[in-house]
Amino acid sequence: MNEIAVEVKGLKKSYDKVDAVKGVSFSVSKGELFGLIGPDGAGKTSILRILTTLILPNEGSANILGYDVVKDYKKIRNNIGYMPQRFSLYQDLSVEENLEFFAQVFGTTVKENYDLIKDIYIQIEPFKNRLAGKLSGGMKQKLALCCALIHSPDILILDEPTTGVDAVSRKEFWEMLIRLKLKGITIIVSTPYMDEANLCDRVALIQNGTIMKIDKPASITSEFGRMLWAIKSENIYKLIQDLRQFEFIDTVYPFGEFIHITSKSNNMDTNSLISLLKGNNHSKIEILEIQPNIEDCFMALMNN
Amino acid sequence: MSRFWGFVKKEFNHIFRDYRTMLILFGMPVAQILIFGYVVSNEIKDIKIAIYDKSKDNVTQEITNKILSSGYFVLDKNIDNDNQVEEAFKKGIIREVIVFEPHFAEKLEREGKASIQILADASDANTANIVSNYTSAIIRTYMKNELMKGDLPFEIDTNVQILYNKELKGVYMFVPGTMALILMLVSAMMTSISITREKEMGTMEVLLVSPLRSMPIILGKVIPYVGLAFVNALVIIALSYFVFDMPIQGNLAFLLLETLLFILMALSLGILISTVSKSQMMAMFISMFALMLPTMLLSGFIFPIENMPKILQWLSAIMPARYFIVIVKNIMIKGSGFMVVWKETLFLVGITILFLGISIKKFKVRLE
């Protein structure tokens, strides 16, 4: 299981004057589901495009299954499945025609590898005669995944496959990825959604073209090493303002309806905080100690 | 091989599903050939003329009436001295002056022969030709119906003089010219757009990350257009032959072969355009301004090359369409064979190879 599928060393890439990737190294084992997690503009797409041989790195090297992405690009192209960030199928061809076309391009047939895509294809099969351009966002991604899988690649590279897809489809999509992983396909996936990190075997947290941390999601969260509280009141906006005024509070980040806070002493008397806030006219205050998630870790790493 | 045919099939699907593409491919050639055809060779109506009657007798009056009642001509003015003829033309309103010689009726009766001079303004060559032909025809009919009633063989001699553009160039130009224009449009513009569309839609990204090599991608994109452009050429030739009586004096197979060569040239140009343009818009503009306009203006299609300034003449020397027009004219009108047009053919072959070479070199196997 520890055989290396993808190895990246000191990768750098810049466009004109912008440094998109500033020296990135990581490796992915065979059969692993590896996540590149980071906000827009972190350099995820550039890394994936270098891996898919679409662009050349300025510095550093990368190899896939032992093939160099610059020299042996033709060999790599036979062995990977790639799903770009933007929906990149033929909108004026039907679902079935797209699938058949990509099968033909890769010198195979839909029948030959039907096993691999069956679970996914079944969901879009009722619409097989519909033009790809007329599908919903989630359907499009499922079709794109089918097309990327049709030649049974050893490695699947997905660039933000769940961006712009509804919550239910996102969940379904990840279930499919996990099933594919169980079939032995190595998967590298990028996403801006931190909650998806937990579904990966290992993740690389990327910010501004550098990797801040690579580890298993559980290890990353366990290394957070601090107490964390979630707090909310009726006036969230004022609550943030007020919390930032308190000397003993360290970080204040809004997460949905809650605010996640840490304290400088790594300890806190929650009752006295509540009474402090009550003095500031807050009502319906709730506070509880929580376990950190990947996003908390990401924020903490960003500030270091 | 099945990879390649899969690609070609996909390409046909794109073409047949997009009604705009279909319209450009099949509607435009027919429309253009008909429009050009009728604009260039249609009947005339209400042409303004002047009459310079030096005789003013009953016969000249009758002929004048016949001409004016034909529906083709409208009398703009009567002229009564030689100087006014030039003046009348210069104003640009009248297209034709009909001059009756002095003592017209008398001469006709006494000598059995009299002259009418027809002066036509051929700054618009085609109209001048038609106008003078119509006038002569009306006079001949009059002569037959009215004067031949008796036994005496009267004869009116119509003397047509074409002014300003004596050779009447440009009459049969429109068929070869339109053919060059349409084939250029269909082949170069459509292929360059269809290749850049893949870039724009992001599908090129997926195609590149596939075992498909650049040659099959390019060939797969181009082959459907070879077929469609060839069908277009056939339609144009058929229309010009059956509707406009354009002769095909030479060998039809040879003509089609040369047409195929021109199509290949235009396609390689289209590929070249697609390698340098990033979007469909850009491909279209390059095709329009770098191809269409020069093809129309500098190939000798509309304006005679001999009349251009030297610089434009040199420019026109590198217009592939110019050579194709020469080839088509030679084959269709003069019935020439390969020995006459080998130089032009060689030029087309050469430039096709050049364009293809550059495009293959410039085709990117990556996104940047």
Image (spheres, rainbow, N blue to C red):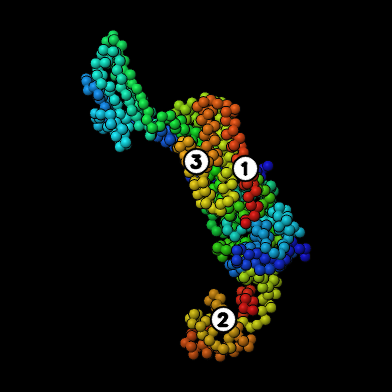
Dot 3 crowding, Cα within 10 Å, few <14, some 14–19, many 20+: few
Residues at marks 3 and 1, CA–CA distance in whole angstroms: 25 Å
**Position above or below: B346 against A222:** above
Give the crowd class for mark 2: few <14, some 14-19, many >=20 residues within 10 Å: some
Look at discs 3 and 2 and give the one toward the viewer.
Answer: 3
Q: Amino acid at mark 2?
A: Val
Disc 2: host chain: A
Element carrying mark 3: helix
Identify whether A61 is placed above or below A111.
below
The residue to which callout 3 is attached is B310
Residue A252: assigned label: 2
Residue with the most extreme front position: B83
Dot 3 amino acid type: Lys
What element does badge 1 sit on? helix
Instruction: Provide residue B32's location: percent of width, then percent of height.
Output: 45, 37
Closest to the observer, B278 or A133: B278
Neighbor class of circle 1 (other Cα within 10 Å; few <14, some 14-19, many 20+) is some
Specify the amino acid type for callout 1.
Leu
Name the foreground residue: A257 vs A85. A85
Residue A40, horizontal then vertical, whole percent? 58, 67
Name the disc covering residue B354, or none: 1
Q: Nearer the viewer, residue A108 or A264?
A: A264
Horizontal side of B43 relative to A236 (left or right) equals left
- Indicate whether A55 appears above or below A215: above
Residue A281 or residue B82, whichever sits in front: B82
Q: Residue furthest top?
A: B151
Q: Tag 3, which chain? A: B
Name the image quarter holding residue B76. Answer: top left
Which residue does the image show at 52% across and 33% down from the upper left?
B326
Q: What residue do we see at 33% from left, 21% from top?
A: B158
Q: Nearer the viewer, mark 1 or mark 2?
A: 1
